[in-house]
Amino acid sequence: MSGRVEAIFVADRAGAAMRAVGRCELVAGAGVAGDRYSAEAGTFSDWPEDHELTLIEAEAIEHACAEHGLEGLQGGFRRNIVTRGIALNEWVGREFFVGAAKCRGTRLCEPCAYLERLTGLGGLVKTLIDRGGLRAVVLEGAAVARGDRVAASEDIIR
């Protein structure tokens, strides 16, 4: 099972607007270089140590946008990497690659009231239950760009 990186988003501090970038560096043990969580400056940085990387399916964002009358990727709904063509929920506890970076899914990234407050979209939590994305840690870092392949480890032939 594989898909593609559709978009990449970072924010330099807690609550800051997410900014789209064409490429980023995933750093083992730290996450997305330049993102608030790699600098331990995110809203939930003091929670369990799996805030290195967050991913969400473009299809989930499109569903939520259609339900709320929005267009576009909406800053990835505060997730770092937007994917297309893969089911992220299946990757909890599994290793996978984003481009050449090796990652491991740790738990689902369920939406919260904080996301609703920042986006101003009441009902977003309900819309994204079980579709809010995946939290992951970076095991082996590498540069990642839009269009890169995202695939489960067993699907990669090295």
Image: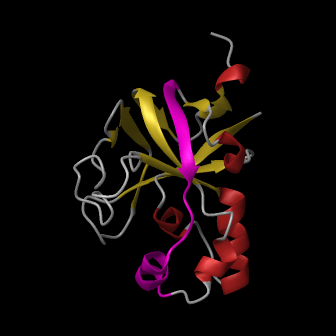
Q: Closer to the camera, 119 or 152?
A: 152
Residue 128's image quarter? bottom right
Relative to 1, is 134 on the left or the right?
left
Task: For the C terminus, give its image quadrant.
Answer: top right
Residue lying farthest to the top in this orientation: 158
**Residue at 33%, 33% in the rendered image:** 29
- Tell me where the magenta segment starts and ends, as one range: 100-120
Q: Closer to the camera, 63 or 38?
A: 38
Task: For the N terminus, give its image quadrant.
Answer: top right
Relative to 18, is 42 on the left or the right?
left
Relative to 141, is 84 on the left or the right?
right
**Residue at 51%, 24% in the rendered image:** 100
Residue 80 within the magenta-colored segment of the rendering = no
Residue 111 within the magenta-colored segment of the rendering = yes
Residue 68's image quarter? bottom right
**Residue at 56%, 50% in the rendered image:** 107
Spot occupied by residue 86 in the image (x, y as percentages of width and height): 73, 44
Relative to 95, is 11 on the left or the right?
left
Spot occupied by residue 40 in the image (x, y as percentages of width and height): 23, 52
**Residue at 46%, 64% in the rendered image:** 78
